[in-house]
Image (spheres, rainbow, N blue to C red):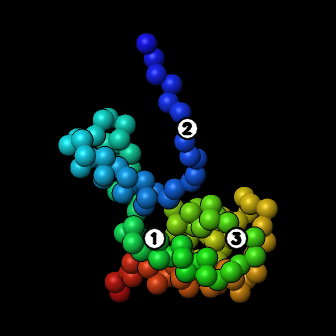
Amino acid sequence: MTTKPKIIEDHEISMVELASEIANIKKRDGELNFRAQKTEEYLSQFIMFKPKDADEIKQKILKLNIPRMKESYIIKILDLMPKSLEELRVIFQSYTITISDDNLKKILDILNEYLPQKKK
């Protein structure tokens, strides 16, 4: 007998949110299966901030009220954490949205508040 899971809700989550969910599963079950362990290892290499910070970044970008900005675009920004205007422009090239340089700079300013500063 096979079970067919029913999809109740479908929405995108950021890597930070995924790491948080995996941590909850690990806490609940005591251990992770092979795929979840590999996912946890992968995420630990790329996540640069805590879930609280990710939510703050998302809210700050939403408050900019950039026309046609969707939450899915913000999630992609959170996952890739661009460090320059060029990197941010590359992210938006895959979408049918044009964002002014002024708004791109505002987004980048928000991201720079949360990026770890390099020691000189």
Give the x, y percent position of residue 117: 39, 82
Check disc 2: other Cα within 10 Å, few if <14, some if 14-19, many if 20+: few
Q: Please report contact status of discs 3 and 2: CB closer than 8 Å, yes or no.
A: no
Q: Nearer the viewer, mark 3 or mark 2?
A: 2
Which tag, 2 or 1, sits closer to the chain's start? 2
Q: Please report contact status of discs 2 and 1: CB closer than 8 Å, yes or no.
A: no
Query: Hey, what amino acid is under mark 2?
Result: Ile
Q: Please report contact status of discs 1 and 3: CB closer than 8 Å, yes or no.
A: no
Mark 1–mark 3 distance (CA, rounded to whole Å): 17 Å
Tell me: residue 119, above or below residue 74: below
Residue plotted at (47% across, 77% down): 56
Mark drawn on residue 7: 2
In terms of depth relative to the viewer, which is nearer, 41 or 51? Answer: 51
Which quarter of the rendering shows the N terminus? Answer: top left
Q: Which residue is mark 3?
A: 69
**Count of number-bearing discs:** 3
Q: Is residue 115 left or right of residue 29?
A: right
Q: Quadrant of residue 65?
A: bottom right
Which tag, 1 or 3, sits closer to the chain's start? 1
Which tag, 3 or 2, sits closer to the chain's start? 2
Tell me: residue 2, above or below residue 21: above
Residue plotted at (56% across, 46% down): 9
Q: Nearer the viewer, mark 2 or mark 1?
A: 2
Give the x, y percent position of residue 95: 74, 60
Q: Which residue is mark 1?
A: 54
In terms of depth relative to the viewer, which is nearer, 1 or 81? Answer: 1
In terms of depth relative to the viewer, which is nearer, 88 or 2? Answer: 2
Q: Secondary structure at mark 3?
A: loop
Q: Quadrant of residue 114?
A: bottom left
